[in-house]
Amino acid sequence: MQSINIYLSKTEIGYYLPDSTSNWRGINLTAAPSGSKDDITVFDGLKNLLSQIDHLELYKINIIPDQHYILYSYLKLPLISKRKISNILQHELGNHLINDLSEYRYDYIIKIDKEQSCIECGVYFIKKDLIESILAIAKAYSVELAGIYPLNHLISQNYIDEHQIQNDSRIYVYLIEKYAKLFVYHKGFLSGYATIFCKSSNIDDLINIINQKITAIVLHENQIEFTRVDSSHPDILSENNDSDIVYPTDPPLTFDQLPPTDYRLFNQCFQPGALPKFNLLKSNIMIFKELKKYSKRLIVTASLFFICLMLYLTNIGFNIYSGKQVNGQLEAKYTQLINKYLPKGTSKINAVYVLKQRITEYEDQQEAVQKYSERKYETITFINDISQMKSKITSLTVKRLSFGQNSISIMGKVENISDYDLLQEIFTTKYPEDHYRLKMDQKSQGNESILFTTTIRPI
């Protein structure tokens, strides 16, 4: 997968393909509206740039912001093992930042000075909010973000020769027509970069602006000595060895003026394998500092966790042992019951099937008995009720009792109409209409005796 290097600055966004000889392609950013953040304009420009790249999904991008977005810090350490440098930086870097270190991601480069027996560290910071915004844009455009790197490589390779960079603090000034580029080096590490524009074509106006910028830099970096740039300087483009402001012998080339042969500098510098150190995309987790800060609590918590874990494992082991014991007892009881209640030769596998058959037969038998018992209970209850009526109606005589599948009938006789009315009242009270249906037929005889038929049907 090919790489695309995208450079972010306050005034311009551009990209370059390391594996190609195509020229630099850039977008000039318009001035941000009053009251808004510069980052908003940069993010809009980045989206605009990504939308102009064909087949963006075939590339992975390297973001290279300038010093407007990347902070710099210089530390001097004694000669120690390289493995200990990261731990020391995690404790020391908090004093060099306005915000908390957890809000930044950082990377560093070291120089070993054996003469002074020390290690010099140049540390570069970038805010996590900026990284999250860049990651969100990369995700929206479905492109892989390989890394975020400082602009130190680009500046060193294209503007300043290696022999010019000293281990002291200097300001390098490059005059190019109506603008100038200032590079501030602190102990040999790039700590600042600025481009100064001048609307006027007068060189004196440009030099005055440069002097104002240098004065501001020196007030901020009090370790830098400088000589003010003057229009009467004998050779404005010659190197001044007596000053900490260095003027190049030849003006640097712009991106559009770089010949094809110079693209090797970009290839050496910006191929993914050539930038392993300065990757600000990686996270810096201060785990050792936090572990030391809460070491006692962590030890107590870990001890309690270990005790709870041991108790839990012991409980699991005991449950497994108890389960085996109970299963053994149940197995023996199961075999004993099979031999006692099931036919001889019944195996454990067939025992369940045999039991199901017997249970089914037993349930069918019980259902039949229950139906018969309910039928018998209704008949006996009815006969008992008739017997109780006999004590109240002395003339009541039952001549025939019959019952079918869904009804019980009687045929009887009473001697007079008053006994019949009393009988009807008792039946109505004894068997309400919502539980029984009553049907009474009366036949008169010469002696005023009444024959009746009563059919009772349970609802």
Image (cartoon, rainbow, N blue to C red):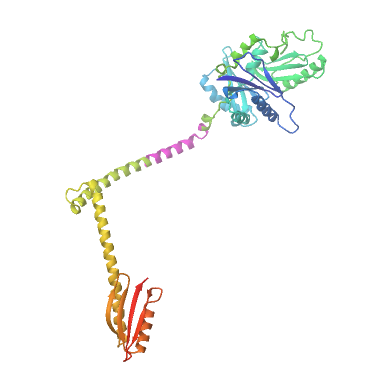
Report the side of 15 relative to 423 (left or right).
right
In the rendered image, residue 146, in percent from the top left (x then y), is placed at 57, 23
In the rendered image, residue 396, in percent from the top left (x then y), is placed at 30, 85
Let me know if residue 216 is in the magenta part: no
Residue toward you, 274 or 203: 274
Let me know if residue 298 is in the magenta part: yes
Residue toward you, 182 or 144: 144
The quarter of the picture where residue 341 lies is bottom left
Span colored in magenta = 291-311
The quarter of the picture where residue 169 lies is top right
Residue toward you, 40 or 251: 40
Q: Quadrant of the C terminus?
A: bottom left
The quarter of the picture where residue 417 lies is bottom left
- Residue 254 seen from this side: no
Residue toward you, 84 or 458: 458
Report the side of 377 relative to 64 (left or right).
left
Q: Quadrant of the N terminus?
A: top right
In the rendered image, residue 29, in percent from the top left (x then y), is placed at 72, 25
In the rendered image, residue 457, in percent from the top left (x then y), is placed at 35, 73
Report the side of 204 relative to 458 (left or right).
right
